[in-house]
């Protein structure tokens, strides 16, 4: 009994000591998001993300990853054979729809120290890819061609076409890739939590089977703190 208790205490002490070497880093990133060249007239918009990283060792870590970005783009109604004189529904910047991409996943990463205060990190993993299209134009009603003679003018025919914004979501799996550089300007001062603050810059993208490489490229400043 005493041997078992001693073994249990030693095992618990080992696990406790092992866990003391670990650290958690929370990173907040914001900047720009570019959906890529799969859409027309893409206008780069905002991006925001958060990572919670758990270091398994000094250099290897796992990350719970969340990222959300938005782009505006032009959805072409031409394939629906709309008469050319029908004015297109679009905003002043030449777009007529929005797409919001959300990614929630798990990444594995590696941290490479450059100096005492500077490091580079690279991560890759697996995520749930959720694309939400907002206000995508769609035709609610188009007159039957057999009744075309009832529309004596182009203006009457135009008024018979009704457009409406449509929202829909697309779910898929993706492989997120992220790179970042971090600088800890207060590390040498060794003052409380300030020494664990990192100011950096992050760049990432998603490999999505239905779209290809480099879908949803995001980039911008990143703020991290370790505990």
Image: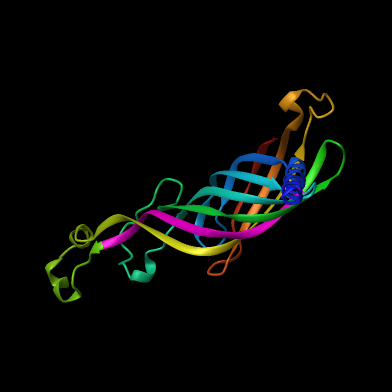
Q: Is residue 96 left or right of residue 125?
A: left
Q: Quadrant of residue 226 in the image? A: top right
Task: Please report the residue visible at 51 percent of the width from the left and 59 percent of the height from the top.
Answer: 129
Task: Please report the residue visible at 47 percent of the width from the left and 57 percent of the height from the top.
Answer: 130
Task: Please report the residue visible at 54 percent of the width from the left and 53 percent of the height from the top.
Answer: 104
Residue 132 on the magenta segment: yes
Residue sitting nearer the eye, 76 or 211: 211
Q: Quadrant of the C terminus?
A: top right
Q: Is residue 149 left or right of residue 173?
A: left
Q: How many marks?
A: 0
Question: Residue 51 at what x, y percent from top left?
Answer: 62, 45
Q: Is residue 25 left or right of residue 89?
A: right
- Magenta residues, dominant SS class: strand
Residue sitting nearer the eye, 160 or 119: 119
Does residue 149 lie above or below 63 as drawn?
A: below
Question: Residue 221 at what x, y percent from top left?
Answer: 66, 39
Name the residue furthest left: 150
Color encoding of the figure: rainbow
Does residue 5 lie above or below 35 as drawn?
A: above
Residue 128 on the magenta segment: yes
Q: Is residue 97 left or right of residue 180?
A: left
Question: Residue 147 at what x, y percent from top left?
Answer: 14, 73
Residue sitting nearer the eye, 39 or 169: 169
Name the residue furthest right: 115
Q: Which residues are magenta?
A: 121-139
Name the residue furthest front: 1
């Amino acid at each position: 009994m005493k041997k078992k208790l001693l073994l249990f205490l030693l095992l618990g002490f080992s696990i406790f000591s092992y866990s003391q070497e670990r650290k958690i880093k929370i990173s907040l990133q914001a900047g720009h998001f570019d959906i890529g060249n799969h859409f027309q007239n893409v206008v780069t918009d905002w991006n925001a993300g958060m990572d919670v990283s758990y270091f398994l060792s000094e250099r290897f870590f796992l990350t719970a990853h969340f990222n959300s970005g938005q782009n505006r783009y032009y959805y072409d109604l031409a394939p629906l054979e709309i008469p050319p004189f029908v004015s297109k529904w679009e905003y002043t910047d030449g777009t007529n729809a929005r797409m919001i991409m959300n990614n929630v996943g798990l990444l594995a990463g590696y941290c490479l120290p450059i100096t005492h205060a500077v490091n580079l990190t690279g991560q890759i993993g697996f995520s749930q890819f959720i694309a939400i299209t907002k206000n995508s134009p769609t035709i609610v009603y188009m007159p039957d061609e057999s009744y075309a003679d009832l529309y004596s003018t182009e203006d009457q025919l135009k008024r018979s076409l009704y457009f409406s914004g449509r929202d829909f979501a697309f779910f898929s799996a993706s492989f997120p890739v992220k790179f970042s550089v971090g600088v800890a300007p207060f590390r040498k001062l060794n003052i409380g939590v300030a020494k664990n603050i990192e100011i950096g810059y992050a760049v990432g993208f998603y490999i999505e089977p239905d779209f290809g490489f480099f879908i949803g490229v995001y980039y911008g400043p990143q703020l991290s703190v370790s505990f």
